[in-house]
Image (cartoon, coloured by chain):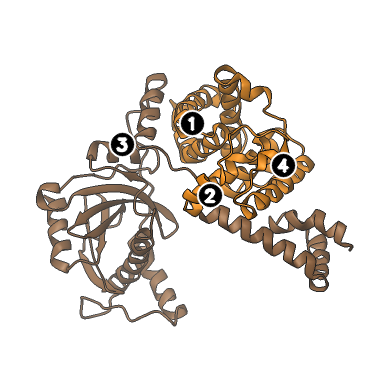
Amino acid sequence: MEDREQFDRLVLLQFRAAFNSARWLLRSREDAEDVTQDALLRAFRFFSGFHGSDARAWLLQIVRNTCFTWMEKNRPMDSAVEFDESLHLSPLPGPEAQAVAGSERERLTKALEQLAPRSREVLVLRELEGCSYKEIASITDMPIGTVMSTLARARERLQQLLSQPGTKEAVHDL
Amino acid sequence: MTCEESRSFLHAYLDGELDAPHAAEFGRHLQSCSNCGRALQALESVRSSVQNAGLREALPPGFENKVRIQLDKISPRASSPRSPMNFPAWSWLAAAAVLLLVVAGSWRFVQRNRSGAEPAASAADSAAAELVDAHIRALQPGHLTDVTSTDQHTVKPWFDGKIAFAPPVPDFAAQDFPLVGGRLDVFQGRTVAALVYGRRKHFVSVFIWPDTTEDMERYSGTWNGYQWISWKQSGLRFCAVADTNRDDLATLKDLFSR
């Protein structure tokens, strides 16, 4: 009972952060809905073990683990190359598709989805969730140095993707 | 600092994660090196486009409720809500308002609906000004509601656990004030409930928070072209804000008080 109140107070406010993280990890809003729900229920079961001060980082760690477990089960092809920075999983839109995709939001969504999973993850935590390097390190279980280099790489790659809208990045990368 | 060293600091500088000595050193380098300056600018522009494109995914409608129902199955919430915070807002606002009016020289004249400028009335005025501003902010795209639903049974439980009191969430669609949704807002540093109603082509925000003071007065006024009206009932202070006419708000107040 007491746990439930604590949980509501500390964790409920982080629902959107959880959902947003899952959406970008899974690159799907629909899948993110189910997985986030699982993650939140798991978080509640583990809640008595949470004694820290950063409920968001704690929750996002659980969301991340739940996403990876889900991907192993449901997208074995994806998770096998999860950490391979050089591979891009999504078929890239050709120039004509990109010309149609008018809005800035769509353009950025596509670019973000084309980033390597780890780069995308770090960038989302930093730019969309406003996490500090330290928080990102604890959520992703990476050393801070790796967080920094991944973030730098992610931004450079994103810059590239955004500055050459018509080119097929996959050709260049593979 | 060489450009190569500077490049390794670029991102940490951008993210405000560089310690003071390094940041100072980096700043000096930037003044003398236009290449690094351009690199920083380019990163800043990519970042601001990522942050401003609305990429942070909003929760699907009904999601919170679904999770709550699941959570309730595992562990029901305590039946008695936590006691509302004792926060005599309007009375300490009276003191704060005097200070505010002195400090904020640029403040516009606030129209008072009472002849004398008693502290309570002027406190209400400045409090209302803050709420009008909150309402105007909420009218920006994407800010009006956190939970969008015309169903009071969706909006009401949405507030559970987010605030320490349970605001009433009536729907007045039959009286031409359809419920649009709800959101959390911040007023005088604490979280308050805000209900949103439609009124023809306008929106009304009704702010609600616990008020434990003796002040039962009804206040109303105008600020920046917006009407506001504030009243108290059942231990809660209400303030409705909109750019409709004053009669509309009075009608809404009467509907709430029924």
User: Are the residues at dot 4 and dot 2 in contact (C-beta closer than 8 Å)?
Assistant: no
Nearer the viewer's eye, disc 3 or disc 1?
1
Q: Quadrant of residue A80?
A: top right
User: Are the residues at dot 4 and dot 1 in contact (C-beta closer than 8 Å)?
Assistant: no
Q: How many marks?
A: 4
Type of the residue with mark 2 = Arg
* Residue pointed to by mark 1: A32
Camera-side residue of B79 and B141: B141
Nearer the viewer's eye, disc 4 or disc 1?
4
Q: Which chain is indicated by disc 1?
A: A
Decide: is A59 above or below A104: above
* Residue pointed to by mark 2: A107
Nearer the viewer's eye, disc 3 or disc 2?
2
* Residue pointed to by mark 3: B157
Give the CA distance from mark 4 to mark 2.
19 Å
User: Are the residues at dot 3 and dot 1 in contact (C-beta closer than 8 Å)?
Assistant: no
* Residue pointed to by mark 4: A172
Q: Which chain is indicated by disc 4?
A: A
- The orange one among the chains is A
Q: Which of pointers 4 and 1 lies earlier in the amino acid sequence?
A: 1
Type of the residue with mark 4 = His
Q: Colour of chain B?
A: brown
Camera-side residue of B203 and B8: B8
Q: Quadrant of residue B241?
A: bottom left
Give the CA distance from mark 3 to mark 4.
51 Å
Residue A146: x and y, percent? 77, 40
Q: Local crowd at mark 2 within 10 Å, few (<14), some, or many (≥20)? A: some
Q: Which chain is indicated by disc 2?
A: A
Q: Secondary structure at mark 1?
A: helix
Residue B234 in sight? no
